[in-house]
Amino acid sequence: MKVPLLVNDFLRRASKLYPDKVGVIDGSKRFTYRQFHGRVNQLAHALRRLGVQKGDRVCMLSPNSHYFLEAFYGVSQIGAILVPLNYRLAPEEHAYIINHAGVKVVIADYDQVRAIEPIRGSLNRVEHFVVAGGAAESFAQAGWKDWDALTGLEPTTATPPVDVSEDDVFSINYTSGTTARPKGVMLTQRNCYLNALNLAIFGGLHHDDVELWTLPMFHASGWGGLFAITALAGTHVVLRAVVASDIFRLIADEKVTFLCGAPAVLSTIIHFADRASYDITTRPRMWVGGAPPPVAHIEHLEKVLGWQFIQIYGLTETSPIVSVNVPDFYNPGGANFERRGRAGTEVLGVDLQVVDEEGKPVPQDNTSIGEIAVRSSVVMEGYWNQPEETAKAIYDGYFHSGDLAVWDEHANVHIVDRKKDVIISGGENISSPEVEGVLYRHEAVLECAVIGVPSEKWGETPKAIVVLRAGKSVKAEELIAFTREHLAHYKCPTSIDFVPALPRTATGKLQKFVLREQYWKGYTRRVH
């Protein structure tokens, strides 16, 4: 009998084969795989009691926590769809996503209830609000159900079987794109399952691995670590916030061997001055994605700290991993650090091409620029309730990434620019039109353009170029503060230049590449 590729099978295997092995460490809490699985079952029963059925959407707004790990499996077990929310978004942004996804149950960390309370009245399809952790009982009078009270009396055995297909949607992950509104990426069970296998293979994972969660769990289902570490019965070590001292303490105390993060996390690690105070006996492997890090950071991680660096490339739309850069036949020992910073070569089950405007592969000469296109079972089902946007991204049998790259004779991909108008700062996607839309609300702004400019810490950071209305004046810091009132702070410009006019074509089309050139001049690649 054919067994479908379902992510809950990863937890089933771990709890069956290694029931007494510690699977999750979250502060003072430690759960064996038997206990972890039991808590997942209790959540699944509780959600069923709330009326959640197959296909219903349940959102999770939380920093990293054991509750978040449990939600991925508990929601999926009953065939419902998890909608992970980026806790760095503003309340009005949460409201759009929750309503657009048609969420039935909102689960929020105790520290994130404040982000939901102001918008509760506008969440017209939400039937239940659940708070996880902290002094959760204090929210009861406000209409919030306590996770632990809700699940505590439920059975630790599995819920009744639900007919779930590997083609069913597992999660809807919202990502900023070229439009002002985020798009809901539908990732299927099969997408996530196959992505996890690639993480396990190219990350060299095994049952003794211990992953420190420096990556937010909401990011594209944790890049597969949620599933791959569980599948092999490794240990999850929860990190609630990226604090350098906590990272080094947990690596030393819990013998961490594996972690993932954006270049900003890598920067935090290598610039931590007090690292000699921690006795690290493992040689952690660090996956970096979201944007290519500076080559100097890679060399520092390996030569000074003695850790191992692995570069990956992917998008939320591809579950996310499509390429990986590890020492190989063409770079034995990984001695060529310049090469190590590239996006790398395609992983298993992925057909990655660099194509021209006609969809034909560009020469593998390390010079000709084309767009990265991907054909694979890790490519998303599409954008939730946005068929037009799906058709723009998936056509001619390939998902078109919007990332421009060159590749060499060994098909090693090097990203050089971005076709889409998206800024990636610290691994977070920022929609330029969204930021511009907020700036245009200010009475002093006549015209504006937001672009990404180089940043040593974040890779790139948003800069606004602004034309003021006649007779109006405003200081840069006032405009920045204005945007921070309406957007998640990471999306807001970190600097503003005032100019008399923006560069445009004869037909009036804004030429952002002209603006970018003055800030990126001298850089061999236009993304960091």
Image (cartoon, helix red, strand yellow):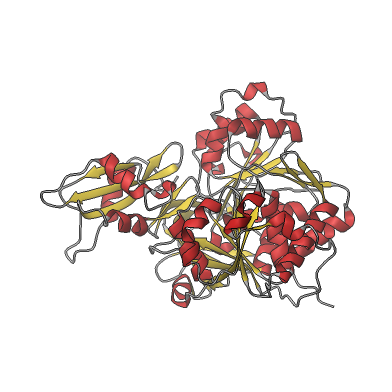
Between 16 and 390, the one nearer to me in the picture: 16
**Residue 168 sits above or below residue 416 on the image:** below
Q: Residue furthest front?
A: 141
Q: Position of residue 182 (x, y in %)?
A: 45, 63
Q: Is residue 333 rendered to the left or right of residue 400? A: right
User: How many numbered marks are there?
Assistant: 0
Between 198 and 387, the one nearer to me in the picture: 387
Q: Is residue 36 rendered to the left or right of residue 320? A: right
**Residue 252 sits above or below residue 180 on the image:** above
Q: Position of residue 55 (x, y in %)?
A: 64, 75
**Quarter residue 47 falls in:** bottom right
**Quarter residue 226 falls in:** bottom right
Q: Is residue 318 rendered to the left or right of residue 19? A: left
Question: Is residue 133 something one can see in this rendering?
Answer: yes
Between 394 and 33, the one nearer to me in the picture: 33
**Quarter residue 167 falls in:** bottom right
Q: Position of residue 4 (x, y in %)?
A: 76, 73
Q: Residue at x 27, y 49 (%)?
A: 515
Q: Residue furthest left?
A: 471
